[in-house]
Image (cartoon, grey):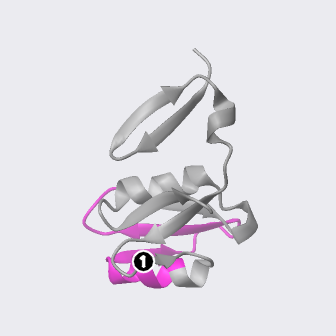
Amino acid sequence: MSGVWVFKNGVVRLVENAGECHSKKMLVHVKSMEVITSYSILERKLSALGWERYYDDPELLQFHKRSTVHLISLPRDFNKFKSIHMYDIVVKNRNEFEVRDTQ
């Protein structure tokens, strides 16, 4: 089985033609409709949702929510922030963030 797993509208599906999924993605905070363009913006939004910053690994930005077992791990360099990281944030923060195609 080859292809790319796509998460859209709460459903995960396998797309056989991976070329269909190569568009650039952006992470959007739903309530404010703000596009996340930096880690400082993302950290503010996550903090408001109860996420706390972990400083254990200097190579990663990590966030933990005390009421869960979830851990969000992101590359320190925002230029390496990819759609897989965005979808991880979306799954762990239902109805707060969305991943969208850039225009």
- Is the residue 68 above or below the residue 5 in the image? below
Start-end of magenta stretch: 42-69
Q: Residue at x 55, y 60 (%)?
A: 73
Secondary structure of the residue carrying numbered label 1: loop
Tell me if 58 is positioned left or right of 11 in this view. right
Residue 49 percent across, percent down from the top left: 32, 77
Number of numbered discs on residues: 1
* Identity of the residue drawn at 63% across and 79% down: 38
Compared across the picture, whether 52 is left or right of 101 comes to left
Verify whether residue 57 appears in magenta.
yes
Q: Position of residue 6 (x, y in %)?
A: 50, 38
What residue do we see at 68% from left, 43% from top? 22
Q: Amino acid at mark 1?
A: Met
The residue beneath circle 1 is: 33
Q: Quadrant of residue 77?
A: bottom right
Where's the N terminus, which quadrant? top right
